[in-house]
């Protein structure tokens, strides 16, 4: 399954623009190779307090070039 390389190219550009950054990792899910976004949500706990949680969402298309990812997860 071949995907575009846009996320890795963007990570290289970030690393080049900020020379003090040693390792830049794009938000790519390792098994599928698809880019993901993390949404920060607030959830009410049993004690009534608010707790922030991260909810990842796999994208169906590359956010950079718009190419649809092959082998969509259904």
Image (spheres, helix red, strand yellow):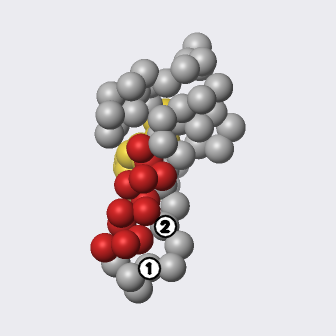
Q: Is residue 12 visible?
A: yes
- Where residue 62 appears, as percent x and y from the top left, is 39, 33
Can you identify the residue that label 1 sits on?
A: 21
Binning the other alpha carbons within 10 Å of mark 2 as few (below 14), some (14 to 19) or many (20 upward) gives some
- Indicate the quadrant where residue 1 lies: top right
Q: Is residue 62 above or below residue 38?
A: above
- Where residue 44 appears, as percent x and y from the top left, is 42, 47
Horizontal side of 1 relative to 54 (left or right) equals: right
Residues at circles 2 and 1 in contact by the CB criterion of under 8 Å? yes
Work out which quarter of the rendered image holds the C terminus and state it. Answer: top right
Horizontal side of 31 relative to 21 (left or right) equals: right
SS at circle 2? loop
Query: How many angstroms separate mark 2 from mark 1 (CA)?
Result: 7 Å
Can you identify the residue that label 2 sits on?
A: 24
Q: Residue at x 42, y 53 (%)?
A: 9
Q: Is residue 71 above or below residue 52?
A: above
Q: Nearer the viewer, residue 59 or 3?
A: 3
Total numbered badges shown on the rendered structure: 2
Horizontal side of 64 relative to 55 (left or right) equals: left
Q: Residue at x 43, y 62 (%)?
A: 12
- Where residue 56 appears, as percent x and y from the top left, is 49, 42
Q: Which mark is residue 47?
A: none
Q: Nearer the viewer, residue 44 or 41?
A: 41
- Indicate the quadrant where residue 37 lies: top left
Binning the other alpha carbons within 10 Å of mark 1 as few (below 14), some (14 to 19) or many (20 upward) gives few
- Where residue 53 appears, as percent x and y from the top left, is 47, 52
SS at circle 1? loop
Judged from this view, the residue extending furthest toward the top is 74
Q: Nearer the viewer, residue 55 or 4?
A: 4
Q: Residue at x 32, y 34 (%)?
A: 65
């Amino acid at each position: 399954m071949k995907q575009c390389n846009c996320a890795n190219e963007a990570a290289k550009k970030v690393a080049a623009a900020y020379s003090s950054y040693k390792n830049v990792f794009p938000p790519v899910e390792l098994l599928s190779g698809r880019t993901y976004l993390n949404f920060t949500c607030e959830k009410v706990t049993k004690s009534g307090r608010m707790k922030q949680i991260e909810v990842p969402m796999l994208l169906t298309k590359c956010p950079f070039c718009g190419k649809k990812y092959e082998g969509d997860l259904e």
